Image: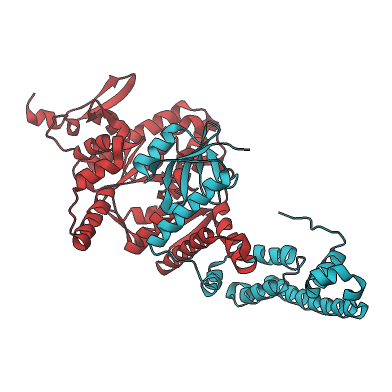
């Protein structure tokens, strides 16, 4: 449904904005979700412009997603002008050094809950190995054991995957399901079938 | 009245139903520059007397709460300054937290050097502060060294004044504040003491404290809400957007005085969730996420380089 949403003040450099949505005023900040959108008053906007570096703006959008895209583009431009680059994979990996024990625990949990059941084994293994390079993890026996457990799960997954692939090749998948075999790459079909079989349901249940 | 008598004069008077203290340094001649830090120091006895008076009028339970609170503040007070991410990075890079005039002055010098453009510091300040400029200017022009004043908030824990995306809170522990030449606290925001184009020195003198009695002034200010507030909520009671004690220090704050930078857990989680996604499920992050992440990484590196701790604050709501 079409609706008009307006940006009325903007701080492009930090990706912050005051918006008017359905005649209500909101303060918007990354990640621009429910928690990042808080109701505010006209006085707040005045104060933000006077004291905190926001500039008055008047941009209208039909959809919330367009507005977010606009703020993100403005931020990208302002940050790039200030010399902020998109990080390389190496720079992202280096950021792991700053992870606290709690963050490491959360990462291991997400590898276990999301990546392995989703068949994202290369990413699971690669991230676990990088986490295992951290002193904080190596010095903590519980975390070290958990990481090793994840690596064993990855190995186990690969073994089962190989067994499945062999089984399906023996069945001569292409001959049995002619249409599917013609339309999709055989490896993808085998992998998807194996995932569905493993979790016992067609679609995943997302956990938060 | 002769000048000799005048210099020793002090008395209580009533204004707007408040009992206020007058003393000789409050002379309101237009050409007099007041010494804020001297006024704050000279108010110590009055604050201690008022605290004792409140205590004596309280029942045993109230007295205990008041004393426990004052002890807690005495033990835990510090200063907080809330900044946006890009502002904090600038402070860490320049290794100094400067007041607004110094920041404009530095920008003006840079503009002159690089582009040959000259800008007026006063005009730029006026433009960037809008209606806020006038009362702030009057306040600062009324005190010795006023244009070097640096403003922060009294903090006894928590995230401080994080409105408008100022989600990083610089914390200066009291041990470092004691290194500053001076520090004055005001019960209310400084510009609220400007009335009819001049500072109400009488009210201000009554509402100010130095470092020695700040715990007592905080207890006096919060005595009503204190009785209904649980201990874990004391930090939010003392320093919230609606209610805080302003701290004024002279000159700049070098970053070696900053002990900690606080960030709310939900914000820290957002950065690390992006890192997880960027390393594993790259289609869940976009270019702006990656730039935010890079900035956060740079910020953490600068904190580490300068020996500043990162503290995660668990809080409810936004």
Chain that is coloured cyan in the picture: A
Q: Residue furthest left?
A: B2
Q: Which quadrant of the view contains residue A42?
A: top left
Q: Is residue B85 left or right of residue B59?
A: left
Residue A64, image x, y percentages: 57, 44
User: Looking at the image, is A150 positioned above or below residue B261?
Assistant: below
Whether residue A140 appears in this view of the structure is no
Q: Which quadrant of the view contains residue B216?
A: top left
Residue B239, image x, y percentages: 45, 41
Residue A148, image x, y percentages: 72, 76
Residue situated in front as seen by the camera: A184 or B151: A184
Residue situated in front as seen by the camera: A190 or B108: A190
Quadrant into which the C terminus of chain B falls = top right
User: Looking at the image, is A128 positioned above or below residue B282?
Assistant: below
| Applied colour scheme | by chain
Residue situated in front as seen by the camera: B57 or B263: B263
Q: Is residue B209 left or right of residue B265?
A: left
Q: Is residue B171 left or right of residue B252?
A: right
Q: Is residue B194 left or right of residue B89?
A: left
Residue situated in front as seen by the camera: A81 or B80: A81
Quadrant into which the N terminus of chain B falls = top left
- Chain B's shade in the image? red
What residue is at 45 percent from the left and 44 percent from the top? Answer: B164
What residue is at 87 percent from the left and 75 percent from the top? Answer: A174
What residue is at 57 percent from the left and 53 percent from the top? Answer: B265
Total numbered labels placed on residues in the image: 0
Q: Which quadrant of the view contains residue B6?
A: top left
Whether residue A169 appears in this view of the structure is yes
User: Looking at the image, is A11 positioned above or below residue B259?
Assistant: above
């Amino acid at each position: 449904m079409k609706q008009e949403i307006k940006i009325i003040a903007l701080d492009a450099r930090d990706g912050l904005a005051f918006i008017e949505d359905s005649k209500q005023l909101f303060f918007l900040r990354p990640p621009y979700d429910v928690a990042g959108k808080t109701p505010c008053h006209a006085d707040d906007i005045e104060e933000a412009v006077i004291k905190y570096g926001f500039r008055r703006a008047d941009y209208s959008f039909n959809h919330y997603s367009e507005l977010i895209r606009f703020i993100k583009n403005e931020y990208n431009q302002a940050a790039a002008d200030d010399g902020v680059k998109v990080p390389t994979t190496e720079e992202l990996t280096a950021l792991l050094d700053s992870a606290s024990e709690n963050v490491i625990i959360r990462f291991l949990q997400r590898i276990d809950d999301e990546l392995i059941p989703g068949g994202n084994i290369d990413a699971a293994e690669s991230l676990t190995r990088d986490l295992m390079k951290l002193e904080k993890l190596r010095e903590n026996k519980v975390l070290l054991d958990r990481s090793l457990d994840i690596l064993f799960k990855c190995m186990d997954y690969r073994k089962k995957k190989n067994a499945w692939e062999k089984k399906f090749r023996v069945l001569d998948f292409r001959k049995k399901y002619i249409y599917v075999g013609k339309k999709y790459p055989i490896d993808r079909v085998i992998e998807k079938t194996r995932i569905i079989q493993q979790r016992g349901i067609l679609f995943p249940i997302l956990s938060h | 009245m002769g000048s000799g008598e005048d210099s020793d004069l002090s008395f209580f008077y009533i204004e707007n139903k408040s009992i206020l203290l007058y003393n000789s340094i409050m002379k309101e001649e237009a050409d007099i520059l007041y010494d804020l830090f001297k006024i704050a120091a000279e108010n110590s006895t009055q604050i201690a007397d008022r605290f004792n008076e409140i205590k004596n009028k309280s029942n045993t339970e109230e007295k205990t709460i008041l004393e426990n609170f004052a002890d807690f503040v005495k033990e835990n007070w510090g200063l907080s300054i809330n900044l946006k991410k890009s502002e904090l990075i600038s402070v860490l890079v320049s290794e100094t937290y400067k007041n607004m005039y110094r920041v404009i002055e530095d920008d003006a010098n840079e503009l002159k050097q690089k582009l040959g453009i000259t800008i007026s510091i006063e005009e730029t300040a006026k433009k960037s502060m809008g209606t806020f400029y006038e009362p702030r200017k009057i306040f600062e022009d009324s005190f010795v060294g006023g244009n070097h004043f640096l403003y922060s908030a009294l903090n006894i824990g928590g995230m401080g004044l994080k409105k408008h995306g100022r989600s990083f809170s610089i914390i200066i522990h009291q041990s470092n504040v004691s290194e500053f030449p001076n520090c004055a606290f005001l019960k209310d925001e400084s510009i609220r003491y400007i009335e009819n184009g001049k500072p109400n020195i009488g009210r201000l003198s009554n509402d100010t404290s130095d470092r020695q009695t700040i715990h007592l002034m905080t207890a006096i200010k919060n005595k009503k809400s204190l009785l209904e507030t649980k201990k874990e909520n004391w930090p939010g009671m003392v320093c919230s957007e609606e209610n805080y004690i302003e701290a004024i220090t002279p000159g700049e704050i070098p970053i070696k005085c900053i002990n900690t930078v606080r960030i709310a857990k939900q914000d820290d989680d957002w950065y690390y969730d992006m890192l997880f996604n960027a390393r594993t499920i790259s289609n869940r992050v976009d270019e702006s996420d990656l730039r935010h992440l890079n900035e956060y990484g740079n910020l953490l590196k600068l904190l580490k380089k300068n020996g500043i701790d990162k503290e995660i604050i668990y809080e409810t709501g936004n």
